[in-house]
Amino acid sequence: MSRTSYLAKNIGLLTISQFGTKLLSFFLLPLYTSILTTADYGTFDLFSTTVSLLIPVLTLGISSGVLRYAMEKECDKAEVFSYGLKYFFTSSLIVLVLVILNYLFGFNEIIKHQSLLVFLLFLSTNLNGIVSSFTRGLENIKAIAIAGVFCTLVTALLNIVFLIPLHMGLTGYLLAHILGSFFQISFLFFATRLWKYISFKKGSSDLKKNMLSYSKPLVANDISWWVNNVSDRYIVTWLCGISENGIYSVGYKIPSVLAMLQNIFAQAWTLSAIKDFGSEDSARYFSKMYALYNFAMTAVCSVLIITTRFFARLLYAKDFFEAWKYVPFLLISVVFGALAGYVGAIFGAAKDTKVFAYSSVAGAVVNIVLNIALVWRFGVIGAAIATAVSYCVIWVLRMVRVRNYVALKINTLRDVVCYAVLVVQAVLLLRFMDSYFLYIAEFGLLVLIVLMNFSVLKMLYKKSIKKISRKQDLVSAEDEK
């Protein structure tokens, strides 16, 4: 299978999985925002973001090592998976102790009232990450795709049951996500026969050392990425209140469409980057894929900025409608995060995870400083702007460093102008009410992005024609036989 076909196959399978899951979650948003209060939504958001911070810290980022070394042909797969499970059990025990201490002494009253569910949320999210990473490392993308669809269906159905007839509120919303995650773990366990990879023997110390050497720098990266993703919500809660954080977190739902595309590509691209790194024409291939990916992200971002208010009216109920204001700059942050992630896959393939750390730490520092300054001065909208700027910083730092491994050929001037166009679109949407003038201007800017990427579209067209011609030649050859 050619590398393009390999990438396309993985993207196709992950698209089936994630498009269906995100689409269902997207259209159930009116249900959630009509039943849950802004405080409920803000509380759930804080629980999930806190768990996402604890996992890489307490497991030393082992899930990344599990993925990378499961793809190494010479590594014992059972040892790789078993090391991941050992760190899962150790981290779970630590969290259990912390939750019990918090329940007894009440350090955090919000967590105290949901102690068991917070612990189960940590368990399910942590184990799901390790199992999913290992399954991807085995290149069983089909199982990942199917599991993702079923997980979302189960979560959605349980949410409907828990929120409507049972009126369980925040507790039901938490429980539905926990059970959905455990369902995904169970499916992957049996679909991939993971019991074959569980070993209680003492494994190779060299493998453990190599996995930790790879994973440890990613802890700083994960923490910093977490800061870029969610520290704004803590600062919004601190300066503006839990209800404002609930509204702000809902603002992420429209950008989640773009994040879905980024996540699909990122998962598939990570596998391809590892396979193709070091090949003779890797620089040419990586450059072409970057150009296509960059155009796709900026074009979809532009479309979503234009349609922000439409989707907000459709999806955001009651007090949540105000969240539309935060969407444009959150969309732009997804674009820069996606491009930084693309380059990051190259560093992962080269096993240089230290560059993840310093670039992400720099972005996190910028994020915190700007968040405090801009939220204090401009309110919640400042958090969205700070997030976009911090991701831009990470992207710039990684683009400078990637030259040490791959000489990416990109049209920097064209790309920067396209990013500036996105910012102009965001400002126009925030400054003007709905009118023909506004949307004519917005659509004109979208056309400008497309025209500036004409060479990319031309390259894609030629590649498609060649592929069609090749298939026709094969069919003709078969007919002659």
Image (cartoon, helix red, strand yellow):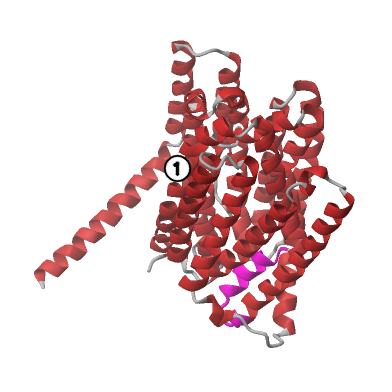
Residue 109 in view (yes/no): yes
Quadrant of image for the C terminus: bottom left
Question: What x and y, as percent, mark residue 453?
Answer: 45, 37
Quadrant location of the N terminus in the rendered image: bottom left
Residue found 60% across the figure and 58% down from its top: 345
> Residue 374's spot in the image, x, y percent?
77, 27
- Classify 95 as above or below 294: below
Q: Foreground: 452 or 51?
A: 51
Q: Is 35 in the magenta?
A: no
Q: Position of residue 354 (x, y in %)?
A: 74, 60
> Would residue 304 be found to the left or right of residue 353 on screen?
left
Name the kind of residue labelled 1 in the image: Leu
Side of 173 where 152 appears, left or right: left
Q: In terms of depth relative to the viewer, which is nearer, 347 or 197?
A: 197
Instruction: Give the residue number, with chain letter if any, for mark 1.
Output: 23
Q: Give the range drawn in magenta.
A: 61-78
Residue 291 appears anywhere in the view: no
**Going 78% across and 43% down the picture, which residue do you hit?**
110
Label 1 CA crowd tier, 10 Å (few <14, some 14–19, many 20+): few
Is 106 on the left or on the right of 166, as rendered? right
Main SS category, magenta section? helix
Q: Residue furthest front?
A: 166
Compare residues 196 and 478 and report the one nearer the observer: 196
Describe residue 357's horizontal placement relative to residue 299 as left or right: right
The single residue placed furthest to the right in the displayed view is 105
> Percent position (x, y) of residue 380?
71, 27
Q: Residue furthest left?
A: 480
Does 406 appear above or below 454? below
What residue is shown at x 52% (from left), y 28% (from top)?
Answer: 305
Is residue 76 on the magenta stretch? yes
Q: Which residue is drawn at 38% across and 61% down?
A: 5
